[in-house]
Image (cartoon, rainbow, N blue to C red):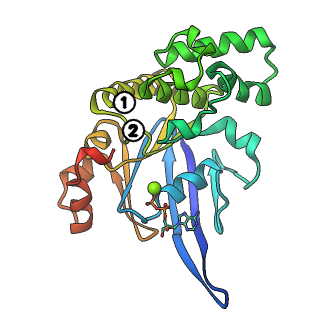
Amino acid sequence: MSELLRVENLSKNYMHKGRWWAPKRIEALKNVSFSLNSGETLAIMGETGSGKSSLARLIAGAQKPTSGTIYLRDQALRPGDYSFRCRHIRMVFQDTDASLNPHLTIGRQLEEPLIFNTELNPAQRREAVADALRKVGLLPEHAVFHSHMMSTGQKQRACIARAIMLNPDIVVADEALAALDSSIRAQIINLLLDLQRDMKMSYIFVSHSPEIIRHMADKVMILRQGEIISFDDANTLFNQQNDPYTTSLLQQTYTLG
Ligand SMILES: Nc1ncnc2c1ncn2[C@@H]1O[C@H](COP(=O)(O)OP(=O)(O)O)[C@@H](O)[C@H]1O
Ligand SMILES: [Mg+2]
């Protein structure tokens, strides 16, 4: 298996407005380094505030690192190079209502990445949208729907369809399954696994659910206070004696997503 993603010494600081003479610096990520092979799925676990969302956003290019470099197939990703990044790395969010535009049809929203990143003509784009809708278990007819006409599960499928429009190498999901009830969650997990088999994508997902991680992940990263405290094969993690922090994460319930 070849190396797909390499993260070197990634750090992210935020300045919190305190008193003007003493703004508080939060070190959300401290010198995070790891690599992932193509087709592998990485799960990121950690308590609230440990830096999971910051890492997901940095990888997806939604935020700039304070320092450090992310390489995709040995090519350094530059902050701001959105067109390269969005062809290769896409993000799916937990809040489907916030990530879909209520004023545009689903079809228009799926077409958007094609308009900006491909030479396809309108008829070809329509066909690609219908194809993506079928791939995620929706119908081509859903292209004319607005998001308020769809269930939560259908909306999450539409978001996944949008994420895969450009055949990305990596889909990053930050607690994307947390808002779904358990039967729909199981369907979406199976959908993600089917898509991965067909499209050979890597997933990087933030989750609290040992169930989801056991089902999907090849590698598991445990973050604590912005640092990686372990990075292992999922099997190793579940079969070994863990430190108390990791054990408590693994004992959390399904409901957190
Ligand atoms: N946009 C932001 N502005 C300021 N501080 C932030 C911002 N996003 C996250 N933080 C802080 O960075 C730390 C890590 O947050 P986050 O990456 O959201 O962790 P997690 O997803 O594990 O809960 C927390 O202390 C959080 O308060
Ligand atoms: Mg978070």
Asked if residue 132 lies left or right of residue 244, the reply is right
Residue drawn at x 68%, y 35% as measured from the top left = 87
The kind of residue tagged 1 is Ile
**Label 2 environment density (alpha carbons within 10 Å; few <14, some 14–19, many ≥20):** many
Q: Count of labels shown? A: 2
Quarter of the figure that contains the C terminus: top left
Quarter of image, ligand 2? bottom left
> Judging from the image, what secondary structure is the residue with disc 1 in?
helix
**Label 1 environment density (alpha carbons within 10 Å; few <14, some 14–19, many ≥20):** some
Q: Residue 50 at what x, y percent from top left?
A: 42, 65
Q: Is mark 2 within 8 Å of ligand 2?
A: no
The kind of residue tagged 2 is Leu
Q: Residue furthest bottom?
A: 21
- Kindly indicate the quadrant of the structure image that contains residue 73: top right
Residue drawn at x 43%, y 65% as measured from the top left = 49
- Kindly indicate the quadrant of the structure image that contains residue 106: top right
- Asked if marks 2 and 1 touch (Cβ < 8 Å), the reply is yes
> Judging from the image, what secondary structure is the residue with disc 2 in?
loop
Asked if residue 222 lies left or right of residue 83, the reply is left
Give the residue at mark 2: 177
Give the residue at mark 1: 189
Q: Is residue 91 visible?
A: no
- Depth check: give the residue in front, 27 or 143: 143
Label 2, label 1: how many angstroms apart (C-alpha)? 8 Å
Q: Earlier in the sequence, mark 2 or mark 1?
A: 2
Q: Residue 189 at what x, y percent from top left?
A: 36, 30
- Depth check: give the residue in front, 191 or 77: 191
Asked if residue 236 lies left or right of residue 171, the reply is left
**Closer mark to the observer between disc 2 and disc 1:** 2
Tell me: residue 72, above or below residue 198: below
Residue drawn at x 63%, y 55% as measured from the top left = 70
